[in-house]
Image (tube, rainbow, N blue to C red):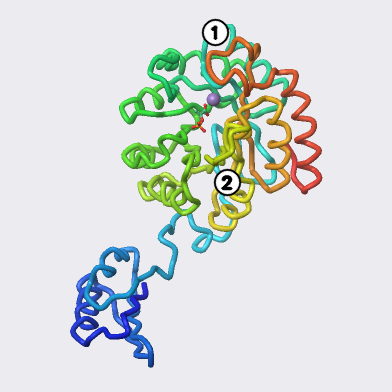
Amino acid sequence: MIIVMQRDADEASVAAVEAKIRAHGLDVHISRGVERTLIGAIGDERKLDPEMFDPMPGVEKSMHIVKPYRLVAREWHKADTIVVAGGVPIGGNTVQIIAGPCSVETDAQMNAAADGVKAGGARLMRGGAFKPRTSPYAFQGKGVDGLKLLKDAAGRHRLPVVTELMDVRMLDAFLEHGVDVIQIGTRNMQNFDLLKAVGQVATPVILKRGMSATIAEWLMAAEYIAAGGNHNIIFCERGIRSFETAYRNVLDVTAIPVLKRETHLPVIVDPSHAGGKAWMVPALSLAAVAAGADGLLVEIHPNPVEAWCDADQALTPREFGVLMERIGQVARAVGREI
Ligand code: PEP
Ligand code: MN
């Protein structure tokens, strides 16, 4: 960390900053220029924060020089990490497709959806049993019964399952039901207690981007999970909030190469919650794969018009099958496969 002193900072202010750095166990290097004095803190600067120095007398500003995230940073781990999710490798040369309905509804709906997931060639199945709805009066999900329906339907095709965890108290039920991948949704990206809890287990975690989260905040959220010991983390870009009302969210395609540079962990894209309309899903899917995404999380439903949640953005199994062909073409064009 570097602390830049004000032009007229006196020796007592410099000494106070130096003492504070040393009190945290770091060394100090002072550089006295013509204009300014710069104080460098040498050592593990993650213990320090600009907030500790900015209010001190004589300090103009202070800043980190290394990134605040470490376990998830490519800076410290050059090679791509492959996260094995229910036996399926995510982050390697194969672009992995996860598909399924927004929410688990009925046995028949789940079985028909699972048939569509399998027929299309996806390798994992999604389905929300606990739904984070804007309205408390909207369908909230089938709860634990939904976990069972999801596992049973997916199990018929030996598909591992992905489902959203909203409440720490449900983690044991997720483990008991053999959830293969825990999804942390947009609304919980900075629910730090939830992040700490999933950091304590070995189950892979899909960490969706908060709807207004910066890349740095997202990486720090992942760092929370990794700091607990669970390094099986997959980032999922799902669109961010903007002023635009013509679509649900803006798919931040730029985030894909930026994240791939910043972290060694896999990066997938959810084109369904980005556009919010089924007809936008193909274009966004292809853009994501072309830009380097390691996978896609796509909502499909056997009968979208009747879906209990996110009806407008679900593809039919047939539409999904057509899209998978095109995803394969783009994947091969960029040297990957599906
Ligand atoms: C979902 O995947 O169904 C979901 C609620 O996603 P998000 O957290 O991205 O809104
Ligand atoms: Mn949804």
**Residue drawn at x 46%, y 54% as measured from the top left:** 216
Q: Which residue is mark 2?
A: 266
Percent x, y for residue 81?
A: 56, 50
Percent x, y for residue 159?
A: 60, 24
Q: Earlier in the sequence, mark 1 or mark 2?
A: 1
In the rendered structure, which amino acid carries the disc numbered 1? Asp
C-alpha separation, residue under disc 1 versus residue under disc 2: 32 Å
Quadrant hosting residue 141: top left
**In the image, farthest residue toward the bottom:** 34
On the picture, is 86 further left or further right than 94?
left
Within-10-Å neighbours for mark 1: few <14, some 14–19, many 20+: some
Within-10-Å neighbours for mark 2: few <14, some 14–19, many 20+: many
Query: Badges 1 and 2: C-beta atoms under 8 Å apart?
Result: no
Pick whichever, 92 or 239, lies toward us.
239
Percent x, y for residue 307?
A: 58, 13
**Residue drawn at x 53%, y 22% as measured from the top left:** 127
**Residue drawn at x 38%, y 48% as measured from the top left:** 224
Q: Which residue is mark 1?
A: 107
Secondary structure beneath dot 1 equals helix
Secondary structure beneath dot 2 equals loop
Residue 108 vertical position relative to residue 186 in the rendered view, above or below: above
